[in-house]
Image (cartoon, rainbow, N blue to C red):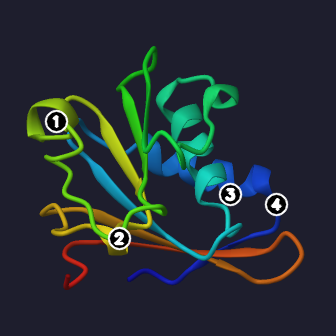
């Protein structure tokens, strides 16, 4: 894992995510971990912005599970597994044919039955006030 970057605001969190989005290719999977309110959805807004998608369209898919955003360099699929005990991406209709064309961002990835190979893990930790520590690492998370 790279040393965490500290963000002092939602704007900075979005900028960190936008910079990461610029490096992503079709089929990229991001696993977003952090407590409730840590800034996972704000991070996804930054991903959208970095992909050329209006970040104002991004909302948490807590009750719908999946939101898809088009119109940018790559489509963005935003998944929130908070309300599930366990989930399989294929069973959610997110097989490789669907996810291979864009970027898949998964909140609460600890609920995944299996972690996609090559996934990028992002850990967001609340440091109080508006500060967040954001760590990014590539590869298997061991699940």
Could you say where residue 97 lies in the image, as x and y percent from the top left?
10, 31
Mark 4 crowdedness (10 Å alpha carbons): few <14, some 14-19, many ≥20: some
Gap in angstroms between the C-alphas marked 3 and 1: 26 Å
Residue at 12% over, 63% down: 117
> Which mark is nearer the camera, 3 or 1?
1
Of marks 2 and 3, the one in the foreground:
2
* Spatial CA span between label 2 and label 4: 31 Å
- Residue 100's tag is 1
Q: Quadrant of residue 103?
A: top left
Q: Do the residues labelled 3 and 1 touch (CB within 8 Å)?
A: no
Circles 4 and 3, Cβ within 8 Å, touching? The answer is yes
Q: For the residues marked 4 and 3, what is the alpha-carbon distance in whole angstroms? A: 6 Å
- For mark 2, what is the residue? 85
> Does 106 sit left or right of 114 as displayed?
right
Side (left or right) of 37 relative to 103: right
Secondary structure category for the residue under label 2: loop
- Mark 2 packing: few (<14 Cα in 10 Å), some, or many (20+)? few
* Mark 3 crowdedness (10 Å alpha carbons): few <14, some 14-19, many ≥20: many
Judging by the rendered image, the residue that carries numbered circle 4 is: 9
């Amino acid at each position: 894992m790279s040393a965490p970057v500290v963000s002092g605001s939602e704007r900075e969190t979005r900028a960190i995510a936008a910079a990461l989005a610029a490096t992503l290719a079709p089929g990229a999977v991001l696993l977003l971990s952090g407590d409730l309110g840590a800034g996972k959805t704000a991070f996804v807004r930054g991903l959208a912005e970095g992909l050329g998608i209006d970040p104002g369209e991004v909302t948490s898919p807590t009750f719908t599970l999946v939101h898809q955003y088009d119109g940018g360099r790559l489509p963005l699929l935003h998944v929130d597994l908070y309300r599930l005990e366990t989930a399989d991406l294929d069973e959610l209709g997110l097989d490789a044919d669907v996810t291979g064309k864009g970027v898949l961002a998964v909140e609460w990835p600890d609920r995944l039955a299996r972690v996609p190979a090559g996934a990028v893990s992002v850990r967001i930790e609340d440091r109080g006030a508006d500060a967040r520590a954001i760590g990014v690492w590539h590869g298997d998370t061991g699940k």
